[in-house]
Image (cartoon, helix red, strand yellow):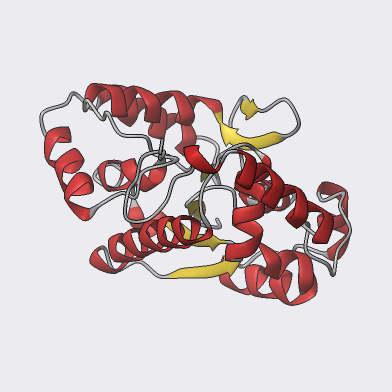
């Protein structure tokens, strides 16, 4: 039996494409997945609900999409979780185990994975760290009206990725790391690496069946970049920037 898979990401990384692709190898996404207006995230909707519930119970008041998460915040959440009744989360995991191999993918895991780790059979899980080219991430964020400076995009993504790698090191977990652009620009090599790491047999036909955009090129081109700059400049006063982590109003 192949290991289960958890994709750890800072978000806006094309993780839905990776999750859809791994579904072709038999990984279970859940009974229902969270669907946005324009695409399926392939996130187990129950996992998303439980992560939201968990953060509410821990009184997390931050803005996970616009706040650079500190190690102190993560330690505080893990410390508070020690007082919680984790029965609903344990029951969810038991249900997932009945559908092995399963795949989890939810950016909220950047905040909650240390809590789930207390319940997970880590020896049965393979981890994927997924990031994205900084410019592509900045363009995507601003096109979706998450107005942020390029510096903020870089700092935010690096901080979360660093915290996720720290978690894996502390728990002696191996992982494989990709940028979304690896799948777009070098799909054959990326599939080969996935197959070797997970002991599966994905093909280019599997990728083409789930990824409907052109391969061998980045998804955001010059036109997207210019539009992102226009949106950014128009909303400049509301941007998220470094060192401040809240929108500027000057």
Tag count in the figure? 0
- Give the x, y percent position of residue 53: 34, 22
Whether residue 49 appears in this view of the structure is yes
Q: Residue at x 83, y 67 (%)?
A: 217
Q: Is residue 106 visible?
A: no
Q: Quadrant of residue 134?
A: bottom right
- Nearer to me, 62 or 213: 62
- Residue 229 x, y percent position in the rendering: 68, 52
202 relative to 235 in the view: left or right? right
Relative image position of residue 42 (x, y in whole percent): 64, 37
Residue at figure coordinates x 34%, y 50% from the top left: 68
Say if 84 sits above or below 146 in the image. Answer: above
The residue lying toward the viewer, choosing from 159 and 170, is: 159
Q: Residue at x 27, y 48 (%)?
A: 114
Residue 24 spot, x, y in % from top left:
75, 49
Specify whether 100 is left or right of 250. right
Looking at the rendered image, the quarter that the C terminus falls into is top left
Which residue is the extreme one toward the front? 250
Whether 113 is drawn above or below 179: the answer is: above
Which quadrant, please, contains the N terminus?
bottom right
The residue lying toward the viewer, choosing from 159 and 90, is: 159
Determine the residue positioned at 42% across, 55% down.
156
* Residue 33 falls in image quadrant: top right
Q: Nearer the viewer, residue 104 or 55?
A: 55
């Amino acid at each position: 039996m192949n290991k289960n898979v958890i994709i750890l990401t800072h978000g806006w990384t094309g993780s839905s494409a990776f999750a859809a692709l791994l579904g072709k190898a038999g990984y279970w996404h859940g009974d229902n997945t969270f669907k946005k207006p324009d695409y399926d995230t392939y996130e187990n909707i129950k996992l998303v609900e439980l992560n939201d519930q968990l953060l509410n119970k821990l009184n997390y008041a931050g803005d996970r999409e616009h706040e650079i998460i500190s190690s102190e915040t993560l330690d505080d959440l893990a410390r508070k979780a020690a007082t919680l009744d984790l029965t609903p989360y344990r029951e969810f995991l038991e249900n997932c185990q009945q559908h092995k191999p399963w795949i989890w993918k939810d950016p909220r895991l950047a905040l909650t994975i240390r809590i789930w780790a207390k319940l997970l059979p880590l020896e049965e899980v393979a981890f994927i760290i997924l990031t994205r080219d900084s410019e592509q991430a900045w363009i995507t964020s601003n096109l979706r009206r998450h107005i942020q400076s390029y510096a903020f995009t870089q700092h935010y993504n690096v901080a979360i990725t660093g915290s996720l790698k720290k978690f894996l090191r502390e728990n002696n977990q191996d992982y494989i790391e990709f940028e979304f652009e690896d799948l777009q620009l070098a799909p054959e090599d990326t599939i080969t690496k996935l197959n070797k790491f997970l002991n599966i047999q994905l093909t280019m036909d599997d990728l083409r069946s789930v990824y409907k955009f052109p391969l061998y090129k980045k998804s955001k081109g010059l036109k997207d970049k210019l539009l992102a700059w226009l949106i950014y400049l128009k909303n400049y006063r509301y941007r998220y920037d470094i060192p401040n982590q809240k929108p500027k109003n000057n």
